[in-house]
Image (spheres, rainbow, N blue to C red):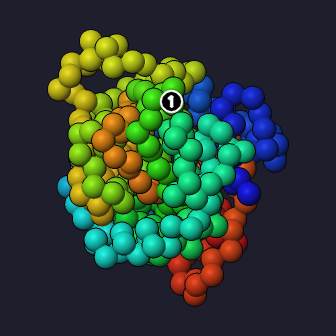
């Protein structure tokens, strides 16, 4: 069963709950001035602190400072090679669905040759070893709290393969911006070794502080290089288990892999739910010891 279905422009399941949901989602799409978005985000953060507890009063970490300045911060090794092996062993017989062909389902060993990207279902993601523990770790929750200025909401989890193929390129493999909430943070963790030819993440430093267009668009490399210069685009390579934090309101893409497939875990923290998503929380099979508020959208 597909979960967290995304609606871009036309209202769908995620935007049928209330007029407030529509206002909050489309409002943050329409308000593009950075200073105004920051003020509104701060008001929302204060309201969340008042209701769900204050953010830990600690000085900003060097990682938070890098995020504020660049929209990107390297986090080093977040998972050990043994932990990555545990995850691969769990996922080996789990069903995948095509990102752009959701009716096509398969296990990794039977991947169609023309499949460019595929994702695991949420129930398998939350029960995959180490995923919820990492998403709820003191380090990542602390970083998210510092960046959001309040207790974060875990609003998305993805485990996505990108495969070498001659199939048409997907939009997330071209430069674009995300628009999920007034303020949000994504943690990316490579679960395979990723070199320059293995689909690295590419991020244009500092662009999270720019005014984004009302309608999200995709752009080719030439346009981005002409506007910002080639040196502004950071190509993120790393061994399996390496992680980094990004504010994907900035311009970014996942490069097309040409040498070998890439598996990446994506953890998103935000102020509010992403109201375009249709959330269907799934059952966690282990002993649940994590914060219910943080995990409420994804874990039943």
Characterize the local packing of mark 1: few (<14), some (14-19) or many (20 or more) Cα atoms within 10 angstroms. few
Residue extending furthest bottom?
287
Rendering coords of residue 105 (x, y %)? 66, 52
Residue closest to the eye, 236 or 14: 236
* Quadrant of the snapshot with the N terminus: bottom right
For label 1, the residue is 167
Counting every numbered tag in the picture gives 1
Rendering coords of residue 144 (x, y %)? 40, 58
Please name the residue shown 21% across and 18% down the image.
Answer: 229
Residue closest to the eye, 67 or 31: 67
Q: Is residue 175 above or below residue 131?
A: above
Please name the residue shown 58% across and 87% down the image.
Answer: 287
Q: Is residue 11 left or right of residue 36?
A: right
Q: Is residue 209 above or below residue 219?
A: below
Q: Is residue 291 above or below residue 202?
A: below
Which of the 4 quarters of the picture holds residue 121?
bottom right
* Quadrant of the snapshot with the C terminus: bottom right
Please name the residue shown 38% across and 34% down the image.
Answer: 256
Residue closest to the eye, 35 or 201: 201
Residue 64 visible to the viewer: no
Q: Is residue 206 left or right of residue 1?
A: left
Rendering coords of residue 98 (x, y %)? 61, 44
Residue 274 visible to the viewer: yes
Which of the 4 quarters of the picture holds residue 86?
bottom left
Residue extending furthest left?
231
Rendering coords of residue 249 (x, y %)? 44, 35
For label 1, the SS is loop
Q: Is residue 289 left or right of residue 163?
A: right
Please name the residue shown 27% across and 17% down the image.
Answer: 225
Residue closest to the eye, 98 or 222: 98
């Amino acid at each position: 069963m597909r979960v967290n279905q995304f609606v871009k422009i036309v209202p769908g399941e995620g935007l049928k709950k209330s007029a407030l949901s529509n206002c909050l989602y489309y409002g943050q799409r329409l308000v593009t001035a950075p200073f105004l978005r920051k003020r509104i985000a701060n008001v929302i953060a204060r309201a969340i602190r008042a209701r769900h507890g204050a953010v830990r009063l600690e000085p900003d970490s060097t990682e938070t400072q890098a995020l504020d300045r660049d929209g990107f911060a390297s986090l080093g090794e977040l998972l050990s090679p043994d932990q990555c092996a545990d995850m691969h062993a769990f996922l080996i017989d789990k069903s995948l669905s095509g990102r752009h062909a959701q009716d096509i389902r398969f296990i990794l060993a039977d991947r169609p040759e023309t499949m460019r990207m595929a994702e695991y279902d949420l129930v398998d993601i939350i029960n995959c070893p180490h995923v919820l523990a990492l998403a709820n770790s003191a380090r990542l929750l602390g970083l998210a709290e510092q960046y959001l200025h309040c207790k974060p909401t875990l609003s998305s989890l993805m485990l996505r393969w990108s495969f070498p193929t001659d199939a048409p390129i997907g939009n997330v493999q071209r430069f674009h911006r995300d628009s999920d909430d007034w303020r949000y943070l994504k943690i990316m963790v490579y679960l395979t070794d990723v070199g320059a030819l293995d689909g690295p993440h590419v991020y244009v430093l500092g662009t999270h502080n720019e005014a984004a267009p009302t309608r999200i668009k995709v752009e080719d490399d030439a346009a981005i290089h002409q506007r910002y210069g080639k040196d502004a685009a950071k190509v993120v390579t790393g061994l399996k288990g390496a992680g980094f934090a990004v504010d994907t309101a900035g311009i970014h893409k996942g490069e097309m892999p040409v040498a070998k497939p890439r598996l990446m875990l994506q953890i998103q923290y935000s102020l509010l739910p992403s109201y375009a998503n249709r959330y269907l929380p799934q059952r966690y099979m282990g002993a649940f010891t994590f914060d219910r508020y943080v995990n409420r959208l994804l874990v039943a």
